[in-house]
Amino acid sequence: MSYPPAVRLPYVESLHGHEIADPYRWLEDAGDPATKTWQAEQDTLWLEHAGRLPWRERLRARLAELGQAGQVTPPVWRGERCFELRRDPGQEHPVVRSGERVVLDPMRLDPTGLTTVDGWEPSPDGELLAYQVSRRGEERAELHVLETGTGRAVDGPIHGCRYSPVAWTSRGDGFFYIRFGQGVYRHLLGEPPERDALVFTAGEGASYGLAMSGCGRWLTVSAAPGASAPNELWLADLTGRELRRVQPAGQAHSVAAVAPDGLLYVLTDRDAPRGRICVADPALPGRWTELVPEDPEAVTTSFTVLEGGTLLVARVRHGLSELDLHDQVSGRRTGGIPLPGSGTAGSLTTRPEGGHEAWFTYTDAVTPPAVWRYDARTGAATRWPAAPGPSAPPDVESRQLTCRSKDGTPVRVVVVARRSWPGGPRPAILTGYGGFGRSLTPAYAADSLAWVEAGGVLAIAGLRGGGEEGEAWHRAGMREHKQNVFDDFAAVARLLVAEGWTTPSQLGLWGESNGGLLVGAMLTQHPDLFGAAVCAAPLLDMVRYEHSGLGRAWRQEYGSAEVPEELAWLLAYSPYHHVEPGTAYPATLFTTAAGDTRVDPMHARKMCAALQWASSGGRPVLLRHESGVGHGARAVSRSIAFAADALAFLAAWTGLSDPPRLAGDADRVDAAAGAQLGAGAPQVVTDGALRQEE
């Protein structure tokens, strides 16, 4: 393949005694005419290649069908009003509903589909809704307020509120919110944002959390110096405006809330890497007593207090969810709630004033997400109103396997495949994340099922650096221990080959963001272990990652090139700095988005140029660039287009058999695409197994 020319400059930077070559530094400037020309030529090259991929149109049509499963969240109660976020078949974005009435629809705000709702919170009486929107994927949210009954605009915009939680005052006349990287502010409705009062700050660049008690008296505030760093925790009594410390900075990851019974509950990994629940008097919030101790094999992820002295506790045991019941006074386990399968339960909600009901979502690799209601009075868990869309294909099943990493650590992987496969190795996709304490748990995803239906295998690895086994598991894969993540992933790849699921030439990798860093490390450390890769929105130049996007906020996770010892950690694995000429690299598709304000597309541009120069194996190295979107949520049609392109690329370069030609294929593709995409709609991956973000 003939690639666009990319000049290799003799640029070398001297940093802490290291001479660091950076021949494609010029590609960091997206506005430079040379970069624009190079990018345009890469776009042409990708489109030419994509147009020849046999599976591309068939996958696009099938993804449109599987995407009809929709999306729904547990109810949010405000008095007798019930709010939910829901996407029905055919909708580009989920909408906020109150009963059957649509309260907020991003397509009404912007018919192009380029505006997304980043967050929403009803007022205590449900009369108002605070919501945040971003445009073209830039995630620079504007905060607005509307009347839920009429849709009339009441307040806003307030700028700089990137994914800020909103904590309404008890009277509904204002709220607390976060200005990104600055601190916690209080806003009174109708007042200009420049008059908003700063009520708490932990210094420049800190990240914050907020939560209000159901009674409106207690506000909890957390602050941390980075995305995965231990946080400090404070409790504010709004009747006296007094701020009390719950936990000092730097000790643990903790969240706290005052429950309807008037007690302060704290979920913390302090002295308990897998989490424990403690309780305190709000007047003395720093004096905890342990209520529910750490489970030695499961990670406690959330809890809620129910009527009748019951704690509902959610845990993840080796990557699979479970729900347990505990006595509110003694902390003793009294029972459990059976789940529909081996999957993921999450998003526990209750009424703010308390009660006997709790709601949660359930999904697994073959089950679309649905909402369940638990009744503490009867002990029964039942489906909340039926989730939209079809059931999963019955021929697909999942199983969990275990292998040993390089240092002997057990690593688990969930494998999803068709039951009816006659046997023998087949094309496979291995995905993982391994960072920021995030757990990969089973979830329904249209892209996953489309691949498995077509005859492929999907494998989802639970790597160190994630949260599958608690905070110690996270720490074992961060900073100076980052190489453990890559060793874990390589061990899983070898397991899939050894047990006959696939072969190296049939194995494809997929990772996004921090997962893209994972794929980049595999490309440079183990190019012989797989045949193809999709490296989406990746971090790849770890010497320069702090200079763009949200890089400075990730120093606690990776380390900093400004510190000599930490630069050595980063250089040891930084993919861009380990590209070797004459290496037969796998077929690789890098993907970027023009509006990405988290991970700068420069990472993919520089790595793509380096691999195109170095690779000797004859397999393509390509770059798919997309305008109008960013790192986060996007329209369903764009998810479908992205997933179809990525899967079709992997299918071609892992040897998936060409799709059977059926009569009327072109008509079916056009009809499915038209129904899902809409005329002129922007064309990204549905939330699920293959898409992960920090």
Image (cartoon, grey):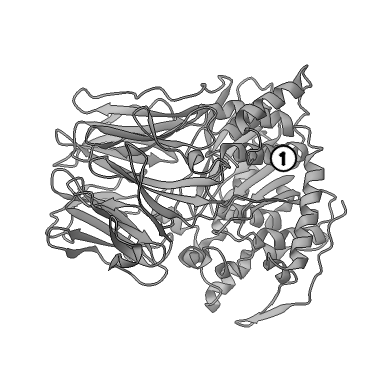
Left or right, 8 with respect to 161, comes to right
Residue pictured at 70% horizontal, 22% vertical: 668
Is any atom of residue 163 visible in this view? Answer: no
Depicted 397 relative to depicted 682: above or below: above
Q: Which of 44 and 250 is in front in this view?
A: 44
Q: Specify the quadrant of the image occupied by residue 375.
A: top left
The 10 Å Cα crowd at callout 1, few under 14, some 14 to 19, many 20 or more, is many
Residue pictured at 29% horizontal, 48% vertical: 294
Total number of numbered discs in the rendering? 1
Q: Specify the quadrant of the image occupied by residue 608.
A: bottom right
Could you tell me the amino acid type at mark 1? Leu
Residue with the most extreme right position: 2
Left or right, 404 with respect to 246, comes to right
Left or right, 178 with respect to 342, comes to left
Residue pictured at 81% horizontal, 50% vertical: 45
> Residue 694: x, y in percent?
49, 53
Q: Is mark 1 on a helix, strand or loop?
A: helix
Q: Which of 108 and 219 is in front in this view?
A: 108
> Residue 295: x, y in percent?
31, 44
Is any atom of residue 609 visible in this view? Answer: yes
Left or right, 137 with respect to 337, comes to right
> Residue 663: x, y in percent?
78, 16
Residue that numbered label 1 is attached to: 650
> Residue 15: x, y in percent?
62, 80
